[in-house]
Image: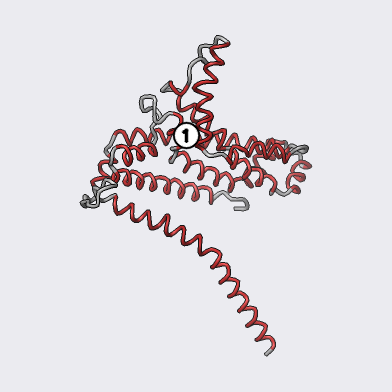
């Protein structure tokens, strides 16, 4: 009988614990359902209409908006820009953040100070960062270039159709490496020191230890960074809106900016929703493929 009571008490405690955990997660679930799932399905519905975002009346048009999106050369050009930008930002952020994390992990003195300094850009809003760098590219750097007689620096790269994207990438790298760097740093500190010491005693060099010990343990972190940066690259909007507004000559017009212009400036609200849905599907497919590819190469598998 005592054992039965003890078991019943334990079972009741587990139920109480689960109920408490559910209550703590309930607000987040409600917010997720209301502000993501409900709005997504409402948007999906309006993507099959001709609603302009203001009028109370609308007509069902079926997949007309999706056919218009897929046949629009302007959308394809913007999507191609997003793909190229995403590839560049994923490679750049991953490499720069990993190098910074390796450097900070080897620092013994003032390590907390340096980590705080490197993390400062992450706490700033993208709009603020874009405005600051916009002034640097448009005023400070050209004036400095003119003062030293350097013609290449005397004009803003944001006014050059071929170099404007480089300026946006620089700003994105400066701010976007902060959080991945912290993730990589946490991954480096989770590697067992016994493995590193054993490999060193066996004669493994620094590069061999990095390839066979460090990288396998960092693969889950690399996967997270790749997925988040892929999403950031495919949905880039803030930097472009503030720094170039899609120019010059639509050289930096991304899908996010095109969606904004169709919805706000041109009154094509239902079409902009269809573009958003297409972009959502692309991001979901890329994320699923990344998870599947990385799941086959975890440590110990």
* For residue 148, above or below residue 1: above
For mark 1, give the secondary structure.
helix
Residue found at the very far bottom of the displayed protein: 1
Q: Position of residue 264 (x, y in %)?
A: 33, 40
Q: Describe residue 61's horizontal placement relative to residue 193 as left or right.
A: left
The image quadrant where one finds the N terminus is bottom right
- The number of numbered discs placed on residues in the rendered structure image is 1
Please name whichever residue, 278 or 289, is drawn nearer the observer in this view of the structure. 278
| Above/below status of 99 relative to 136 | below
Q: Is 31 on the left or on the right of 43, as rendered?
A: right
Residue at 63% across, 76% down: 13
Residue closer to the observer: 221 or 124:
124
Q: Residues within 10 Å of mark 1 (few under 14, many from 20)?
A: many
Q: Nearer the viewer, residue 125 or 216?
A: 125
At a point 53% along the width and 39% down the height, the residue shown is 125
Residue at 41% x, 23% y: name it: 161
Measuring from the top left, give residue 5's x and y in whole percent: 66, 86
Please name the residue shown 69% across and 40% down the image. 209
- Residue 181 screen position, x and y as percent: 62, 40
Q: Nearer the viewer, residue 117 or 100?
A: 117
Residue at the limit of the structure toward the top, as seen here = 149
Q: Which residue is mark 1?
A: 239
How are the residues colored? secondary structure
Q: Position of residue 92 (x, y in %)?
A: 54, 33
């Amino acid at each position: 009988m005592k054992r039965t009571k003890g078991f019943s008490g334990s079972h009741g405690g587990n139920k109480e614990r689960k109920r408490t955990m559910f209550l703590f997660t309930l607000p987040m679930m409600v917010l997720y359902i209301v502000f993501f799932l409900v709005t997504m399905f409402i948007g999906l519905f309006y993507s099959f209409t001709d609603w302009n975002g203001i009028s109370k009346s609308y007509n069902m048009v079926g997949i007309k908006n999706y056919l218009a999106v897929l046949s629009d050369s302007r959308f394809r050009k913007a999507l191609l820009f997003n793909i190229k930008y995403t590839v560049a930002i994923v490679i750049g952020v991953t490499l720069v953040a990993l190098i910074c994390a390796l450097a900070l992990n080897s620092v013994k003195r003032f390590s907390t100070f340096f980590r705080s300094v490197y993390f400062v850009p992450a706490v700033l809003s993208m709009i603020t960062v874009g405005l600051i760098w916009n002034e640097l590219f448009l005023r400070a750097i050209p004036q400095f270039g003119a003062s030293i007689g350097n013609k290449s620096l005397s004009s803003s790269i944001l006014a050059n159709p071929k170099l404007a994207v480089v300026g946006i990438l620089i700003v994105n790298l400066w701010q976007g490496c902060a959080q991945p760097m912290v993730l990589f740093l946490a991954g480096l500190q989770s590697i067992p020191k016994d493995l590193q010491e054993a490999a060193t005693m066996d004669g493994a060099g620094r590069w061999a230890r990095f390839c066979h010990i460090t990288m396998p343990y960092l693969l889950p972190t690399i996967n997270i960074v790749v997925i988040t940066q892929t999403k950031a690259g495919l949905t880039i909007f803030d930097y472009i809106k503030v720094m170039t507004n899609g120019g010059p000559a639509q050289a930096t017009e991304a899908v996010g900016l095109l969606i904004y212009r169709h919805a706000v400036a041109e009154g094509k609200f239902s079409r902009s929703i269809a573009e958003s849905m297409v972009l959502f599907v692309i991001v979901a497919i890329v994320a699923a493929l990344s998870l599947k590819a990385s799941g086959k190469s975890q440590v110990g598998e």
